[in-house]
Amino acid sequence: MVEGEEQQSVGGGQGRESGPTRTCVGCRQRHDEADLLRCVPMPVEGGEGATIAVDWSGRAPGRGVYISPSVACVRRAIERGGFSRSLRSKLSLPRSEVFLEAIRLGLRHQMGQRLSLARRAGALISGESKVLEGLKEGRGLVLVLASNLSAGSRRKLVQNAERKGLEVISWMTGEELGGRIGREHAGVILVEGQPFASDLQRISRQLAGVQEGGVPKEGTPPQGEEEQDRAD
Ligand SMILES: [Zn+2]
């Protein structure tokens, strides 16, 4: 059995349900498994040997290790040999910036998938006026805003969501959001059902952890998928 792969249940937790915990290959701390990303060795495309990839299904066979979705932990695992040591094999690893970007893309893809599923399950409302109405009626669990939503709409929606104690997440553009729910564009989506809402909250936390230069402020739009231009 590989280091970090042993399961262990702990009681308590920090207010959330706690399931099994795993050791992060970067910081060597134990965390809830659900918060970590499972990584597995993958054959190098068109080359020899193996590299590392996130197992997005969480169920890929074989040895796996777990990593906190954090810039520091990814750097440590790659630059200080955490991956190679834990998997007991020589890996050709990507540069940490490249691996971090792959994680960000993967997480955004996961977020889009959850939105598609929520839409198919009839567990979301979209469109500004319908969402505002829904919020007033006390509906919804998570508010998803397009990163390129106008400042005026954003302010109004964030205010209403905060009044109801809803989390606001904003990692995708209106075009990206629309594409996931069968529209050309979606500026705002109110997610009403589980497990979609809690999945989106977890993925949003994970995305925040892998942002270079720290976490964007609540309600401010992230700068898209290109290199971020934010001052520290
Ligand atoms: Zn860690």
Image (cartoon, rainbow, N blue to C red):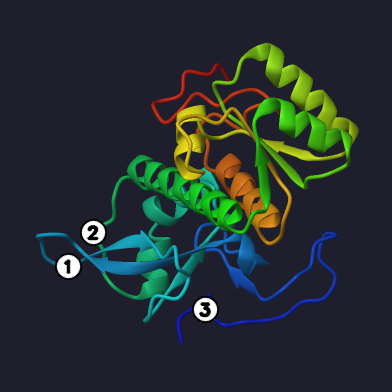
**What distance separates the C-alpha of mark 3 from that of mark 2?**
21 Å
Q: Position of residue 69 (x, y in %)?
A: 54, 51
Q: Are marks 1 and 2 in contact (CB under 8 Å)?
A: yes
Q: Residue furthest bottom?
A: 1
The image shows a total of numbered marks equal to 3
Q: How packed is label 2: few (under 14 Cα within 10 Å), some, or many (20 or more)? A: some
Q: How packed is label 3: few (under 14 Cα within 10 Å), some, or many (20 or more)? A: some
Q: Which residue is mark 2?
A: 92
**What distance separates the C-alpha of mark 1 from that of mark 2?**
7 Å
In this rendering, would 124 be left or right of 210? right
Given residues 85 and 203, the one toward you in this image is: 203
Vertical arrangement, residue 214 with respect to residue 122, above or below: above
Q: What kind of residue is marked 3?
A: Glu
Q: How packed is label 1: few (under 14 Cα within 10 Å), some, or many (20 or more)? A: some
N-term mark: 1 or 2: 1
Q: Which residue is mark 3?
A: 5
Q: Are marks 3 and 2 in contact (CB under 8 Å)?
A: no
Task: Label 2, secondary structure: give it.
Answer: loop
Task: Label 1, secondary structure: give it.
Answer: loop
N-term mark: 1 or 3: 3
Q: Position of residue 95 (x, y in %)?
A: 31, 45
Q: Residue at x 45, y 81 (%)?
A: 2
Q: Which mark is residue 194?
A: none
Quadrant of residue 47 within the rendered picture: bottom left
Report the image quarter containing ligand 1.
bottom right
Q: What kind of residue is marked 2?
A: Ser
Q: Which residue is mark 1?
A: 49
**What distance separates the C-alpha of mark 1 from that of mark 3?**
22 Å
Vertical arrangement, residue 111 with respect to residue 25, above or below: above
Q: What kind of residue is marked 1?
A: Gly
Q: Residue at x 84, y 28 (%)?
A: 160
Q: Are marks 1 and 3 in contact (CB under 8 Å)?
A: no
